[in-house]
Structure formats: structure tokens, C-alpha cells
Amino acid sequence: MSHIKPENADQLEEAIKWALSEEESIEVTGSGSKQTFGRSVQANHQLDMSALTGITLYEPEELVLSARAGTPLVEIQEELIKNKQYMAFEPMDYGPLLKGEPDPGTLGGMISCNLSGPRRLRAGAARDHFLGFSGVSGRGETFKSGGRVVKNVTGYDLMKLMAGAHGTLAVMSDITIKVLPAPPEEKSYVLYGLTDEQANKAMSVALNSSCEVSSAAHIPQSISSKLSFETKKRAITVLRLEGHGPSVTYRADKLASLLTDFDTGSLIAERESKPLWQKLRDAEVFTISPERSVWRVSLPPAQGSTFIKSLKLEDQAEYYYDWAGGLIWLSLTGDGNASVLRDKLKSMGGHATLVRSPHNIGDAATPQHPLDPGEHALMKRIKDNFDPKAILNPGRLYADL
């Protein structure tokens, strides 16, 4: 496999035009932190975007930042911290789970995978903060979409297509995102010993209140004991509160009064709260057992405990709930049975993605949730329009796309 490393947008266009003319497939990479997330790409060449780096525009007063696609997220986060700002959608770091060490990746990888973390409940995902980009399609054509403000979207909203496309439609060279002021204080209210069903009710009460809970998670005792956090050897239900100090204190007191039916909880300070949410964000507890598969299951929050019970996995499974139960991180011995997982989800309106497998899944299975015929036809038409020769990350999402 040859290595192509463009240093600017013009060289990127030239590289893709060459690949198109020769009908040579290319695998698009940045730092490689998520290279094993999804199906393996069988390509003739690797397009390394790591040289296209640097913040090109940052206006803290306008809450907008532009950077080249290969810019490390660490560099962007450091610049935002200087101005007490952040990416509110809290992008997950897949490095520990997939590579065994932290590696938050690049701006392009973050957008391509549409990353988000526990704050997804209130802030949305990367696509909701994605304002615009420049890129090169599989036709070898440079194009732009969006702009520097949310309302500056004319014609097709192509950002929604690029976010989550895993580099299969176009290769972005420059990206603009919305940033926000970082909350000055963070605390979390913790309830102990709740069952999955009780936790679901408690999280529902909290989120439907005026307490402005920004994140809600439930961690069973088998997982909570691995968090390096004082859990009193019981399951924990964690509700995050952010904002100015007096507001956080007031909302925490109000939350405690609303949740008296679920026993008395405790309020943990920022020094404990932040590391805890980071571990939940990065599924850090599942890095301990690399021989086990790891799944992300999305479904309506009220269905979470029902789904887990229906699997009848007993001690074979380790799991916890994020997004108030709307996201289940599930670890199984071996690959687990993908068809069983997905069959259970059909009636619940959910889907399951295999994030990490202890084996080479090859072409025999797809880590992405299968598409129904209508969805597949639509995705095929989109792929054909952006990349008619299928030279960009062929097969990354599905074998025939």
C-alpha cells in the first residue's frame, strides 16, 4: 500500500483526481485513532491527512472556530481552554478502547464519525455544531458547504451528510464548528443502589424537571466497582449539573427534593465529577478486557432495562447506561451474537453497533446496524453521486457501499 500525504487543499484535490483517473481505492486516515472502528478498508493506497493541520480562524466573541481537517483535537481543546470555551458535544476519545492509549484524534475524524459524549442529551452530537467545510468529492471536485454561522446554510445542508459518513463521500480539508462558553462549575448528584428500572424512573424525573441536568447515567454494581470512585459497593445513578456555583447548588438541592422516593443521594464536587464522566464518555472500564467485544446500543430510554433482560446473558454481560438510558455500552464474551442483539432491537426501534471485536470480523459481518432495503437504496444513490467509482474508504460502513 502506497502512502499519500497531501500538505494543502490543492495537493488533496490532485491526489483524489489521480486515484479517480486510475480507479485506485484509497483509505483516508488522520491520526488513526478510529481506524479499526467499522469495517476494514481494502484499499490500494492510504491518504494521510495528518499534514493538513492548524487553526485557520478563531473568533472567541463569535463562538466560531475553523481549522484544517488533520488538526489534532488536543491542539483545538488547548486553544479553547485559554478562552474558557469548549466543544459542548464532548467528543468521545476512542483511543483507550481501540488502541489501548488515549488519542482523541483529529478534527476531521471527529466530524466524520459524528462523535459525542454524555452531554449529547442537551448539546447534541458533532453534526449539530458543524457549520461548514471545504472538501474534495470522489469525483475529484473541490466544493464548499455552509459557512461561519448557523443561518448561513444555503441549498443542501451537506454537513448532515458528511457528519457520520466515515470519509466515504468526500475528504474534508477545512472545517468550521461552533464552540460555546465552558460552564464555570460542575457537580454531580449521585444515587446509590437503584435497580435498572428504578434508575430509569429517577433519570426521567430529573430530566423532566427544571434542574437542567446535562448528563444522566446508570452504572450497575459490577461496573461501578471498576471506576475508582467511592460507590459504597453499589450501583450508582449519576446526574450532572453545570453552570455558575449558586445556580448549581440551588438546582442540586431541588433535585434532591424531587428524588426523595429513590433514597438520599450525595453531591460530588468537580474534582470527582469530571474524571467520572470522562471515564463513562470513553467507556474506559471496557479497556481492561480486550478479549471481549464492545457494543454501542441506541434505543428509547424506557426500553433499556427491558432489552438487557431479554438477552438473558446473566454474568456474561457487562453494561452501563448513558444518555438517561438511550445509550447502552455493552461488553460480551467473544463477539456475542449480533443477529440476536439486533433481532431484539427490531420491536424497540433501536440499533446496535459493534465498536470493538476481539477477532477479525472481515467481510463476514458488519459492525454497523443492517439497513432496510429503502435505506440501502438511498445510501447507494448518495454514494454514487459523491463517489461514483467508490474510491473513498470502500466498504468502511457496508460491504457494497
Image (cartoon, grey):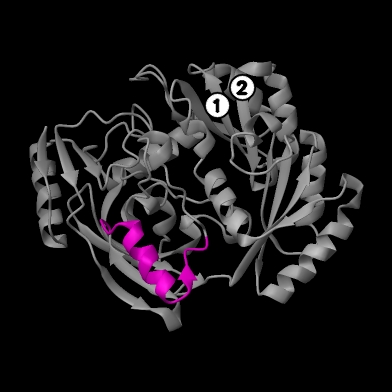
Mark 2: secondary structure? strand
Q: Is residue 114 visible?
A: yes
> Neighbour class for label 2 at 10 Å: few (<14), some, many (≥20)?
some
Q: Position of residue 17 (x, y in %)?
A: 11, 49
Residue 176 seen in this snapshot: no
Residue range corresponding to the magenta coloring: 69-88
Magenta residue check for 279: no
Q: Is residue 171 left or right of residue 340?
A: left
In front of the other: 151 or 55: 55
Residue at image x 39%, y 58%? Answer: 158
* Alpha carbons under labels 1 and 2: distance apart: 6 Å
Looking at the picture, how far across and down is residue 337, in whole percent?
54, 16
| The furthest residue to the bottom | 61
Q: What type is the residue that disc 2 sits on?
A: Ala
Q: Is residue 28 above or below residue 354?
A: below
- What label does residue 317 carry, if any? 2
Q: How many marks?
A: 2
From the viewer's side, name the closer residue of 398 and 315.
Answer: 315
Residue 331, numbered label: 1
Place residue 309 in its image quadrant.
top right
- Would residue 79 be counted in the magenta stretch? yes
Residue located 81% across and 47% down the image: 202
Three-letter amino acid code at the position of disc 1: Ser
